[in-house]
Amino acid sequence: MIKRIIPCLDVNKGRVVKGVKFLNLRDSGDPVELSVRYEEEGADEIVFLDISASIEGRKTLFNIVKETARNLSIPLTVGGGITSLEDIYNAFSSGADKVSINTAAVMNPEIITKGAEEFGRQAIVLAIDAKKEGNSWKVYIKGGKERTELDVIEWAIRGVELGAGELLVTSIDKDGTRTGYDIDLIREVSNKVNVPVIASGGAGHMEHFYELFLETNADAALAAGIFHEGKVRIYDLKKYLSNRGIEVRLIDSVLA
């Protein structure tokens, strides 16, 4: 199974930002410039999340999505402020290949089913922001600001039953800490569902990606800060993983 490396663009007011545990956001650059750079480095996909859309109760910045998509040939997933079939349609019209839904899916689970029926389940990504409580995890919405009573594992299973074709699981506890992915969380989720799982939150070194793929059934690893800062280049990361027996897509044309 080929593992995917996915840079994430957390966009706030048109700029890419990054924080720690969803707080203390700092500017990391222009989404179009970063996405082009990541494709050149060998990224498999790009995830574009308008992180303040749900909190502010507004729609996604589709003009920026359109500009980003226009410059890419790899798949683009768009999330943040997606609350209706019309929003999903607008995302695809702007060039997205998939949509990521979190808050709206919790508030109105029917959007997962209707979206899958209308656009195909492969196009619907259920995003789950998880925070540990005791021996389990709770689902958070609205950019990690609001706790729900949903159990993450139960919600992941139900989301797939409703029609989600992929899960994007983010550990709030690990987000921006650079201490490694939440292996227990990702292992638990990926063992319970039969759709691809993207792990997010905590990547700080190349070894963390290797550990993730070695110890869980995750299909993809998402990261942000270490790519934005140039701490890890995607091409170098993929060579590192390949040399250690992890199957990844390598592009010969990318300059080392």
Image (tube, rainbow, N blue to C red):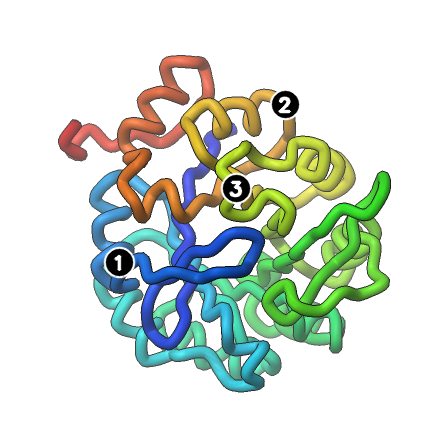
Looking at the image, tell me whether mark 2 or mark 3 is earlier in sequence order: 3
**In the rendered view, would you say 247 is above or below 15?**
above
- The x, y position of residue 147, in whole percent, is 76, 65
Circle 3: element type: loop
- Dot 2 corresponds to which residue? 215
Disc number for residue 177: 3
Position of residue 51 in the picture relative to residue 75 (left or right): right
Distance of mark 2 from mark 3, alpha carbons?
20 Å
- The x, y position of residue 99, in whole percent, is 52, 66
Q: As drawn, which residue projects farthest toward the front?
A: 24
Q: Marks 1 and 2: CB-CB under 8 Å?
A: no
Disc number for residue 30: none
Q: Is residue 198 visible?
A: no
Q: Is residue 39 visible?
A: yes
Distance of mark 1 from mark 3, alpha carbons?
29 Å
Looking at the image, tell me whether mark 1 or mark 2 is earlier in sequence order: 1
Q: Residue at x 24, y 67 (%)?
A: 70
Q: Amino acid at mark 2?
A: Glu
Mark 3 nearby-residue class (10 Å; few <14, some 14–19, many ≥20):
some
Looking at the image, tell me whether mark 1 or mark 3 is earlier in sequence order: 1
Q: Residue at x 57, y 21 (%)?
A: 214
- Dot 1 corresponds to which residue? 72
Circle 2: element type: helix
